[in-house]
Amino acid sequence: MEASLYLHIPFCAGVCDYCDFYSIPVEPKDPRIRRYVDRLLEDGKRFIQDLDITAVPTVYIGGGTPSMLGASEMRRLLEGLAEFWEVPPEEITVEMNPESGDEAFLEACRDSGVTRISLGVQSFHVPSRQAVHRVGADYRADERLRLVRDIFGRQFSVDLIAGLPFQDENILLRDLEQVFAYEPVHISLYALTLEPGTLLETRSRLKKTLIPDQDARDALWITGRDFLEQAGYEQYEVSNFCLNNNQSIHNIRYWRMKNWLGLGAASSSTLIDDETGTGRRVTFEPDLGLYMTRTGTPLTEVLDVLTLMKETFLMGFRYRRGPEEKLFQKRFGLSISECIPRTLGSWRMQGLADPQKTALTSGGLLFLDRFLRDVFEEIETKIRK
């Protein structure tokens, strides 16, 4: 079986107010870091053998903040992972934040086979960063961009956020221009989302942090999207843009609903049987202690045909090329056009779906949630018959 590999590193220098990923603040020399790497390698070896995973096309190490591992532990993790495959993955991505990733860390990544760094800048604007308790200084982000460019050339990605407090159109465009100066092949521009349970959502609800309203955040993001496209970056997914077709291969496998194995606290695996159109998802609890002591019980979920089909559409239509037609036909025994003819017809009439393929237009992506509601309503009627 072929499966990509995702490793979740829950450690952070600090937790940003908007973040809803599982993370815990630690100091760089925290002894749990080394023990966590041990556990990741133990689990990786065990699951790859037990599941008979013979090929790992991509690896993504995310978080949290993977650069909190430091150079020596990241090198040990990457060298340990390399023992799991005979043919190296086509793509290995490591996330890094400016406050923790240094030259030694980047060199350890490069020397151990990493092909792409993903740098979490979010914004250079000091008031915006401070308003959401973003750790690190704006000048450090600029320093790290220069260092990443020196060590990895242009093979890196930068994350930015539109809709932060105190951010307007001019500030966002200045952020983008500052990133353009380093010519990354990939940029992710996310619209700020007030996730339930996050400190930012609570503070916004209590009027303790002033956030632009939804319409203003959406308009700001569209301004950023247009600016990226004018600079030559192609929007190939809702929030992702690239130069010269330098798409994230790992993330495309998510959007195409292909197998992935997750390791670490709060990680999940999705393994699919293409012949039956069903799958299985296993999720580790978001609890470092339970993961480290093996006392937790992973949640196992069966993905029946309807559930897997919904997820295929949910993920696939984020991608500008849409779900993978041949794989959909193999799994479900009918084409996408046969599955949702009414929805595709209606959205094509409105100019929001591509007339030549099963994918949304750039304008249609702005209404993805509404499109998916139409899709789910149609397939629930069809599949349950």
Image (spheres, rainbow, N blue to C red):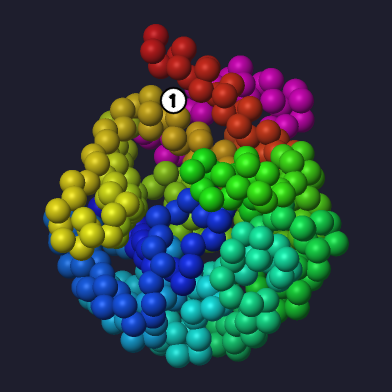
Residue at image point 65% right, 66% down: 130
Position of 221 compared to 204: left or right?
right
Q: In which quarter of the image is the C terminus?
A: top left
Question: Which span of residues is magenta-colored?
Answer: 326-354
Is 347 covered by the magenta stretch? yes
Find residue 149 and report its horizontal and vertical position in percent.
62, 83
84 w.r.t. 230: above or below: below
Find residue 191 and report its horizontal and vertical position in percent.
66, 50
Amino acid identity at mark 1: Leu
Residue 350 figure quarter? top right
Find residue 231 and report its horizontal and vertical position in percent.
80, 65
Position of 349 compared to 324: left or right?
right
The answer to whether residue 61 of the structure is visible from this angle is: no
Residue at image point 31% right, 28% down: 304
The answer to whether residue 89 of the structure is visible from this angle is: yes
Which is more toward the observer, 71 or 347? 71
Position of 39 compared to 61: left or right?
left
198 w.r.t. 330: above or below: below
Disc 1 designates what residue? 334
373 w.r.t. 164: above or below: above
* SS for dot 1: loop
Is 277 covered by the magenta stretch? no
Which is more toward the observer, 262 or 362? 262
Residue 375 figure quarter? top right
Q: How many labels does the image show?
A: 1
Check disc 1: other Cα within 10 Å, few if <14, some if 14-19, many if 20+.
few
Which is more toward the observer, 259 or 65? 65
